[in-house]
């Protein structure tokens, strides 16, 4: 028996499309899990130098940051967000096949560019679909639910990929993962286009479902709160993005074929924490506010990096990495939520996502190269301690310069979102 949409004060939440959105987040996260630490481990296993691995990861990040703002503009204007996600899924699948089948530098370089460019569209487009389905009032808890399903998907994929890498080879991970494109597209097809409110999906008032007026780009880019938030995420990425790749490179040389299992454990543990905490973060953001949660999430980063500098024991590394689950839960929900707070009524939500994504993407791209150079010249301990210093600066900027972004009169989303979750369960 089909479930009726849940009535809210001003809208009906499309339950069937929201269920499909759950599975879209699940399978999309699983599809994307092969990149990052598994890619670094695979290239290291093929004999690539640490500096070349850092260069390829940097190229991927640079490709993403150069397309973030245009992608945000495109998502704001596109009538069909589903088409953008489908196209991005096909591109990611192509990159996975190249990583699995080719070993030459030009092919790996091209695949890295494809993967980085696609990342500019997939994540922001899924958030735009979420906003279009539920609106600003229910967005906090919806983002928490998105993060939970994405974490579970990433968790299961990481464990499976670790087994594949151990039983066969690290290269086979990419070929097996490419098959996940099919359930991604199936889940996407079950989200009805008519359920995605166009104006809401780009942060505009709800007065028209198919078209909207937007504020000027200049006005958006002059918002000091938005720029401060972007600066904090930049420093966060400089500190955080290189940690797992650095650990993956150390493990390949120290643990050999066991490295894929250890890397899987480093990913699986935090994903469990994220899956548990993300819905709580979404609910708490409406009561505590955004700023306290952001401070807590960022404070974990220097603690992790300091401990990583002091040990090479695989068991301790896995234990320390569990703390990353708290940061992942907070940033996974808060990034889009803070941007939605700051851009509500502007019609530029996705462009703002592109701006913030570009700035944080610069940090992620620089992180792997900078840490790689530090490690090659001064050793792994110096690399992790430099990460600690950068993350402390990010916390200080957030504490001093970013005010609370939660609306003065918090929307009464707890009851409505809880009703929706019960219907979706």
Image (spheres, grey):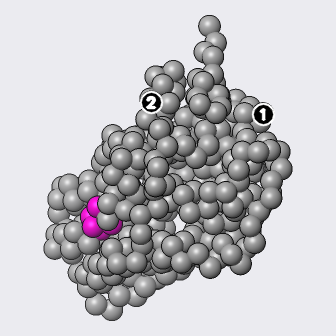
Q: Residue at the location (77% across, 62% down)?
A: 214
Neighbours of disc 2 within 10 Å: few (<14), some (14-19), many (20+): few
Residue carrying label 1: 194
Is residue 402 or residue 272 the one in the foreground?
402
Between disc 2 and disc 1, the foreground one is 2
Is residue 12 or residue 316 the one in the foreground?
12
Q: Residue at the location (57% across, 56% down)?
A: 340
State the image coordinates of residue 286 (x, y, percent, origin top left): 41, 47
Question: In this orientation, does residue 1 appear?
Answer: yes
State the image coordinates of residue 172 (x, y, percent, origin top left): 52, 50
Q: Quadrant where the N terminus lies?
A: top right
Q: Residue at the location (80% across, 44% down)?
A: 208
Residue 299 vs residue 284: left or right? left
Magenta span: helix, strand or loop, mainly? helix
User: Is label 2 in a helix, a strand or a loop?
Assistant: helix
Residue carrying label 2: 415
User: Is label 1 in a helix, a strand or a loop?
Assistant: helix
Quarter of image, res 373: bottom left
Q: Which residues are magenta?
A: 296-301
| As drawn, 65 above or below 419 | below
Residue 106 vs residue 376: left or right? right
Question: In this orientation, does residue 175 appear?
Answer: no
Is 271 included in the stretch rendered in magenta?
no
| Sequence-first tag of 2 and 1 | 1
Residue 345 vs residue 176: left or right? right
Neighbours of disc 1 within 10 Å: few (<14), some (14-19), many (20+): few
Residue 84 vs residue 42: left or right? right
Q: Residue at the location (49% across, 55% down)?
A: 407
State the image coordinates of residue 283 (x, y, percent, origin top left): 39, 42
State the image coordinates of residue 210 (x, y, percent, origin top left): 83, 45
**Gap between marks 2 and 1 measured at Cα:** 25 Å
Is residue 26 or residue 30 the one in the foreground?
26
């Amino acid at each position: 028996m089909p479930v009726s949409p849940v009535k809210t004060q001003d809208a009906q939440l499309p339950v069937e499309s929201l269920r499909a959105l759950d599975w879209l987040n699940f399978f999309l996260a699983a599809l994307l899990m092969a990149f990052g630490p598994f890619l670094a481990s695979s290239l290291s296993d093929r004999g690539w130098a640490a500096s070349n691995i850092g260069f390829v990861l940097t190229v991927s990040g640079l490709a993403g940051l150069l397309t973030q703002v245009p992608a945000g503009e495109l998502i704001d204007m596109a009538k069909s967000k589903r088409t953008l996600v489908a196209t991005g899924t096909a591109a990611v699948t192509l990159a996975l096949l190249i990583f699995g089948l080719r070993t030459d530098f030009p092919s790996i370089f091209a695949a890295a560019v494809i993967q980085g460019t696609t990342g500019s569209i997939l994540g922001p487009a899924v958030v735009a679909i979420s906003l279009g389905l539920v609106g600003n009032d229910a967005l906090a808890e919806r983002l928490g639910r998105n993060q939970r399903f994405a974490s579970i998907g990433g968790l299961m994929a990481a464990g499976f990929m670790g087994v594949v890498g151990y039983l066969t080879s690290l290269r086979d991970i990419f070929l097996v993962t490419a098959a996940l494109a099919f359930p991604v597209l199936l889940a996407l097809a079950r989200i009805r286009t008519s359920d995605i409110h166009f104006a809401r999906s780009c942060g505009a008032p709800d007065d028209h479902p198919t078209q909207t007026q937007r504020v000027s780009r200049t006005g958006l880019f002059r918002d000091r709160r938005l720029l401060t938030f972007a600066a904090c995420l930049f420093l966060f990425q400089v500190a955080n993005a290189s940690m797992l790749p650095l650990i993956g490179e150390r493990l390949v040389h120290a643990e050999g074929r066991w490295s894929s299992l250890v890397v899987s454990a480093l990913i699986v543990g935090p994903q469990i924490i994220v899956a548990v905490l993300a819905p709580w973060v979404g609910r708490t953001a409406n009561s505590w506010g955004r700023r306290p949660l952001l401070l807590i999430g960022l404070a974990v980063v220097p603690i992790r990096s300091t401990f990583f500098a002091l040990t090479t024991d695989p068991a301790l590394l896995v234990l320390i990495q569990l703390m990353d689950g708290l940061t992942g839960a907070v940033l996974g929900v808060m990034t889009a939520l803070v941007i939605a707070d700051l851009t509500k009524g502007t019609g530029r939500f996705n462009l703002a996502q592109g701006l913030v994504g570009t700035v944080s993407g610069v940090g992620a791209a620089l992180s792997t190269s900078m840490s790689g150079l530090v490690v090659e010249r001064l050793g792994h301990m110096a690399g992790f301690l430099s990460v600690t210093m950068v993350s402390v600066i990010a916390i200080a900027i957030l504490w001093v310069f970013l005010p609370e972004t939660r609306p003065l009169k918090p929307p009464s989303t707890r009851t409505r979102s809880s009703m929706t979750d019960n219907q979706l369960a």
